[in-house]
Amino acid sequence: MKEENKQIVFTGALSLADTYKSTRYQLIIRRKYPMIYISTMTFSMSFLLYYAFKDESTSQQMAIILTAATVTIGLIGGITVLYFLIKKRTETFYKLDPVVSKEAKYSANDLGIKIEMISEVARWYEWKEILNSYEFNDMFLIYVNSISVIYIPKSFFETQEDINEFSTFLSQKTKKIDK
């Protein structure tokens, strides 16, 4: 006997904290590209700084120490600035898009996922249209395309069983799910 078309319904509104988490998770998903860039730049700058510090009056050991200190300070400063820029950008986008913070009703079934907001047009995504999905401890990220992402915090679900069923939907219906 074939199982009936199961439907999971859940509601919620994204908070600014949820948006910060989703941005962090997106960076985790795409972390290999920035790491390659940072590694290449660090190596290049180390090479250039070493030869800039190394001259007749500076020993090799002192040139290495100055290079390491300069690169370390640069990395710490750069990462700190990047953190605050990303946080500020996320906050700005959250405030600019009033739809993000509205409460929405989500429905997922064998055909796809539907998102309905009060006084907004409902959005319907068939499973075959979804690029891939990711599950984290407290949130699902569903990529509709390379730019558009659906953020679904697990707090939107009423029970753990609903979370498990939705996770099963994603693993069965989307091309990829990473936990």
Image (spheres, helix red, strand yellow):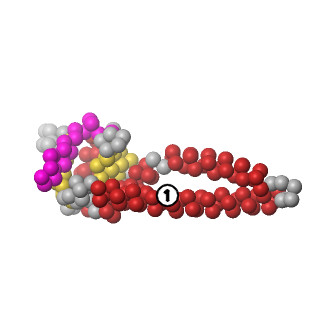
The range drawn in magenta is: 113-132
Q: Residue at x 15, y 46 (%)?
A: 122
Q: Residue furthest right?
A: 56
Front-most of residues 15 and 92: 92
On whether residue 126 falls in the magenta region, the answer is yes
Q: Is residue 165 visible?
A: yes
Relative to 33, 162 lies left or right: left
Relative to 136, 105 lies left or right: left
Q: Residue at x 56, y 46 (%)?
A: 37
What percent of the width, then of the height, locates residue 53?
A: 77, 56
On whether residue 55 falls in the magenta region, the answer is no
Q: Quadrant of residue 132?
A: top left
Relative to 174, 103 lies left or right: left
Q: Quadrant of residue 129?
A: top left
Q: Residue at x 22, y 38 (%)?
A: 126
Q: Indicate the secondary structure of the residue bearing disc 1.
A: helix
Q: Is residue 137 visible?
A: no
Q: Residue furthest top?
A: 128
Q: Is residue 49 above or below residue 175?
A: below
Q: How many marks?
A: 1
What percent of the width, then of the height, locates residue 26?
A: 40, 51
Q: Residue at x 68, y 60 (%)?
A: 70
Q: Looking at the picture, which amino acid does disc 1 mark? A: Leu
Q: Residues within 10 Å of mark 1 (few under 14, many from 20)?
A: few
What percent of the width, then of the height, locates residue 137?
A: 36, 59
Q: Is residue 30 above or below residue 82?
A: above
Relative to 55, 17 lies left or right: left
Front-most of residues 174 and 50: 50
Q: Which quadrant is the N terminus positioned in?
A: top left
Front-most of residues 65 and 49: 49
Front-most of residues 18 and 176: 18
| Residue identified by numbered label 1 | 82
